[in-house]
Structure formats: structure tokens, C-alpha cells
Image (spheres, rainbow, N blue to C red):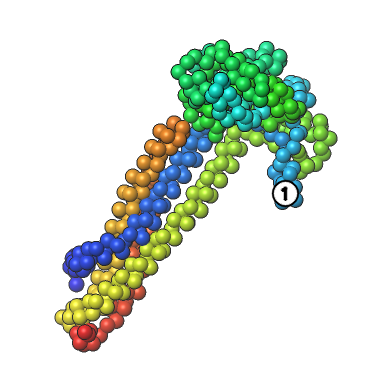
Amino acid sequence: MKLRHLLSTATTGLSAHKKRSGLTILGIVIGISAIIMVMSIGMGAQELILGQIRGMGSRIISVEPGRMPQGLSDMYEMYTESLKDREVKAISNPNNVRGNNRVAPFVGSTETVTHGNEKMRTMINGADGLWMEILDIYPEKGVMFGEDEVKQMAKVAVIGSNVKKELFGESDAIGKKIKIKGYNFKVLGVLPPTGILMMMNIDDIILLPYTTTQKVLMGISHYHAILVQAETEEMVPGIVEDIKKTIRELHDITDPDEDDFKVGTMDEAMDIISGVTSAMTLLLIAVAAISLLVGGVGIMNIMLVSVAERTKEIGLRKAIGATKSDITIQFLMESTILTIIGGILGIGIGAGLSWSIGYGIREFGGFTSWTFFFPISAVVMGISVAASVGLVFGLYPARQAAKKSPIEALRYE
């Protein structure tokens, strides 16, 4: 029998039970939609994070306290107070670290801030001008505090746009006072609406001189990180080694495995994040693929029911000359057509939901740089997987139909 006749027969058989055919492909639609969504959103999230890291510049080196734990017994060693003023001074010394353009310590805390009767709990970042240069954001109104304010531990602040809105409403915030842990801080500037940068919502933060945050608010002598800016990208590897050597000498460390600090570059961070996000995406795809397996089993069950219902039809076709291969191909076509239709619908629904979720993240989640991705590889994989599911799970019912004796089939009630 010609292929077009087999295709026509398969289509006729499916159209005779439209509702059942529609319900049969539901599992395939859900599975393919989930895979499209996972891949699209995963690629969007990865690009968002990597874009933020790229925005920091490839010349930035981060020094953080603690080390990666070797096991559960030394988890506490992730959190140490190993970075203090002497480490900042040693790293800043060009005799120790050659080619560093600037060194900036950083501390952070979450505190409740008030103005009059208004209050909110938000992130307090102790930083200086380099931190602002890295993020490439500057006050929209007012000014940023300078080195003098840092040295004097001045009680001054630059606030995010949401902080301004929550505490001051429509009135001007410049020159006004906000209170944090009982201390009054004068507002010098207001940042423009920015959204998420470096995994922080810039609109919700308050910037203070790092000395003020460290000594006045937190009462600590250590830093949560030290940022080092290299003069050129080519100097980064050498600066990393100089920093490690300098801190090891300060801490009397001879074995690198005993380091109580971590030194990282933007390239390393990008590699780590790319690996993590890719692994998570693959894991979620594997979980989503389970619904395809369930959908395949559903198709096999429905096809077995269809074979039983159409026993007489099978017997009649075999009686007038249809071969076993004709019957097998017909039922394989039916299952494959079902799954391909499900795959196409799944791709369309998955793309639509991915775009909608991305739009919500961009418009309402603060991630203004979120990019919608429609992965062509996911489309190819979706159609391929759908067709494969149809063939694999349709093979057994098709073979069962082909095995039927025409005489017994015609006498079947």
C-alpha cells in the first residue's frame, strides 16, 4: 500500500475520535512545553547573571574571607574574619602587589532604617567610589560621598530609588536625615531606578562609607570582601598570585590548602556560574522529560484500546490484501502523528509561557536586562523526542495489530 494511502487511513482513524486523541497528546504537550520553558528561562537566567559579571569588568579581582570546606566537619571555616585593615594595606602596597589600580574593602548588613513615621528593612552596603565605578551607577540627584567621608567615618548616605519612595514619598530627600540603629545619617544622593545588579536590587540599598558601616553600625574590625582593580586585563593573573603570596605571608600559611581566604576573578566566576546554571538546566530538563515518558505510556495504552476496538477493520483490511507491514506502519503513523502534533503544540505553548514569564520577571521582578531566548535546539529536540516517543510507544500496539489473524479478526465481536 502506498505511503499516502497509509497516511490518509491513519489520519481518518485519529479524526474519528477527536476528544480521545486530544487527551492522549496532553502528556506530550505538557512535557515539551516544560522542556521549552526550562531551556528558555535557564538561558535567560544564565545570560542575566553573566551579563552582570561582565558589567563589573574583567579587571576586577575579589578577595573574600574563608575557604571552601573540605567536608561537613569544617563548614565553619567558610566564615572567618581573615580580612582586616592590615590585609587592605598590604594589598594596596605596590611593592607587594604590582599593577593594582585601586583597592576597595566592602562590608554589608541588613538593618531597619526610619525617617519620621516611615520605616523599612533593607540592605546596607559599606563601600566607596570604586564600588560605584564597578557598577557604573551614580546618583541621579545629589552627590556621592568621597574619600574624606570614608576617612572620617562620616554619617552620610546615598539611597536607592525605592528607599527614597518608601521613606520620603514625593518630597525631596537630599539633605534630610534617616536613622539607622539610633544614628542619624544625612542623605547626600539618590540613585536612579536601576533594578538588579550583581544579584542585588540597587533600588533597595543604602550606601554608606565602609568605615562607618564597619565601625559604627556593625562594630567589627574585619571586611566581608576586598575588591582589587587591575591596571590592565593582562596583569590580572600576576596580581592574583601576588595577592595570594602577600596574604599567606601575613597569615604564616605555607600550605595553599590551608588558605583562610579566596581570590577570584570575573572569568573564574563566569566559568563557575556557567557550569552551575547549565547543570541545573539539564537537571530540570531531565525532570520535565518524565512527563514525556508518562505521555508515551498513555499513548501506548490508547493505541492498544484502539487496536481492540478496530479488530474487525484490521481483519477486513488484511482479507483484501493488506500485509503485516501495512498494518504496522498504519498504527505507527497514528501514534507518531499524535506525538508530533503534541510536540508542535508544546513548542508553541512553551514559547508563549516562556515569553510571558520573562516579561513578568523584567517588568515586575526588577530584572530589567532579562532577555527572552527561544532555543532552536529545544525545537529540534522537541520534535525529535515527540516523534521518537510515538515510534517507541506505538510499536507494541502496531505489532499486536499486525499479528491478528484475518479470520479471527472478522469473527471478533
Q: Quadrant of residue 130?
A: top right
In the image, taking residue 176 as reference, residue 412 lies left or right, namely: left
Q: Is residue 9 visible?
A: yes
Q: Secondary structure at mark 1?
A: loop
**Residue 382 x %, y %:** 37, 54
| Image quadrant containing the C terminus | bottom left
**Residue 355 x %, y %:** 36, 41
Q: Residue furthest left?
A: 320
Q: Residue furthest front?
A: 117
In the image, taking residue 122 as reference, residue 311 lies left or right, namely: left
Q: Nearer the viewer, residue 180 or 161?
A: 180
Q: With respect to residue 391, does 60 lie above or below?
A: above
Category of crowding for the residue at label 1, using alpha-carbon neighbours closer than 10 angstroms: few (below 14), some (14–19), many (at least 20): few
| Image quadrant containing the N terminus | bottom left
Q: Quadrant of residue 90?
A: top right
Residue positioned 59% across, 37% down in the render: 269
Residue positioned 81% across, 37% down in the render: 253
Question: What is the count of numbered marks?
Answer: 1
Q: Nearer the viewer, residue 237 or 392?
A: 392
**Residue 30 x %, y %:** 37, 56
Q: Is residue 96 visible?
A: no
Q: With respect to residue 182, does 288 lie above or below?
A: below
Residue type, mark 1 in image: Gln
Q: With respect to residue 200, does 165 lie above or below?
A: above
Residue positioned 48% across, 52% down in the render: 284
Q: Which residue is the site of mark 1?
A: 70
**Residue 24 x %, y %:** 31, 64
Q: With respect to residue 373, does 390 lie above or below?
A: below
Q: Residue furthest right?
A: 252
